[in-house]
Image (tube, rainbow, N blue to C red):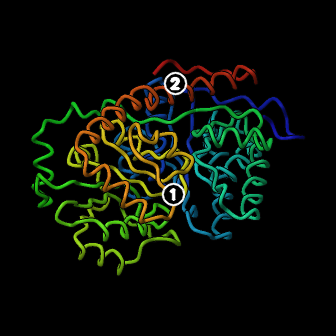
Amino acid sequence: MSAPGLPSRPPPAPAGPVKIAHLTTTDISLRFLSLEQLRAVRDAGGEAIGISAPGPFVEDLAREGIRHVPLPSSTRGMDPLADLRAMTELRTVLRRERPLVLHVHNPKTGIYGRVVGRLAGIPIVVNTQHGLYATDTDPWAKRLAVYSLEAIAARFSDAELVHNPEDLALLRRWRIAPSARLLGSGVDLVRFDPDRFPTETRRAVRGELGIAEDRVVVGCVGRLVAEKGYLELLDAWERLDPDRFSLVVVGGEDPAKPDALGHELLERARASGVHLLGQRDDVDALYPAMDIFVLASHREGVPRAAMEAAAMGLPIVATDIRGCREVVTHGRNGLLVPVRDPVALRAAVERIGSDPAQRAAMGRASRSMAAEHFDERSVVRRTLETYREVAAAKHVPFALGAP
């Protein structure tokens, strides 16, 4: 949808390979949210570009043949002046690079990226809604602010892609983005396949961590911020029998976030026996050592780590929120518990942890659900189809082959 008062026909795109740029706040999002889509553009003969604040994951992009363009002022924290600088930097980048498609992600870059992209004359502007930054339990003031900003920004994009059907229904019901379409979400089902890993992998990982084979290992993967439900998880952990259960947490610290877990809390967790592994690139090899996956988040779009765990055939305990409800069917492949309820969280872990047959049945159901609903290749295909449909509707040449 074009913004009112702006030209319906964009300027002609430059000659050469189709140039498609993905914009995120930080490079970790390019690495873990957009990489497969960037790879698809590269493999189809286009030029794939990532725009974000620079960081340690830029090297990963370079190894993939994906050029990174830095947006130095982009931040995840609340900093209006930095955001204004980032918008100016983005305008300069877009005028220099002139991509045919600007595909934006994340709450902040998703808002200003759509506006700056359209005003900079980018022919095709696409937004992926990974999860509305307001939930049904938030105060109305926050919800109205978020919904209003999304409604304005949506008028500057050509397509709105939504991961979560609950968000899609809300966007349509409130006419925030009436023409939004469901993109779905997925993971690499080849990488996250339990059949890739022999039984020795489980023993080796547990041996490295000093965890006995008879322990029930509860695993969690996610950034070390309170929003991911770590306070409730650590509370639940203190209520579990340490002679029967072990807790393994995979995820890096995120000091830029206001709800980042403090050093004192993390040290107390380590002292209580929690295995804090930090950021890991081999998370696929860590899942086989787990017996139950837990995600106690307060807010999610569609949780990628939970989809990975499902693909790896793990039963899942998750909070009863949008996103998690897309991955967990209560009683089939896991259990849903109320948000911010460590007692219910402990009870759910105890229930599954005490029943090996139930764990096995739920694990099989998880893998089946992942195979049916969480294939990342389908997400990539729908994304490229969206580019082609918008290009055809706007009479923009779009010469991109099949990846």
* Residue 40, numbered circle: none
Picture layout, residue 32 above or below residue 402: below
Q: Residue at x 63, y 22 (%)?
A: 388
Q: Nearer the viewer, residue 256 or 185?
A: 185
Q: Residue at x 83, y 31 (%)?
A: 8
Picture layout, residue 86 above or below residue 34: below
Left or right: residue 128 compared with residue 173: left
Q: Secondary structure at mark 1?
A: loop
Q: Position of residue 240 (x, y in %)?
A: 28, 65
Q: Nearer the viewer, residue 52 or 96?
A: 52
Q: Nearer the viewer, mark 1 or mark 2?
A: 1
Residue that mark 2 sits on: 381
Q: Nearer the viewer, residue 381 or 13?
A: 381
Q: Residue at x 72, y 28 (%)?
A: 12
**Are dots 1 and 2 in contact, CB under 8 Å?**
no
Estimate how packed mark 1 is, as few (under 14), some (14 to 19) or many (20 or more) residues with alpha carbons within 10 Å.
Answer: some
The answer to whether any part of residue 3 appears in the image is yes
Residue that mark 1 sits on: 338
Q: Secondary structure at mark 2?
A: helix
* Mark closer to the chain start, 1 or 2: 1
In which quadrant is the N terminus drawn? Answer: top right
Q: For residue 288, what is the image quadrant?
A: top left
Amino acid identity at mark 2: Arg
Left or right: residue 93 compared with residue 63: right
Amino acid identity at mark 1: Pro
Estimate how packed mark 2 is, as few (under 14), some (14 to 19) or many (20 or more) residues with alpha carbons within 10 Å.
Answer: some
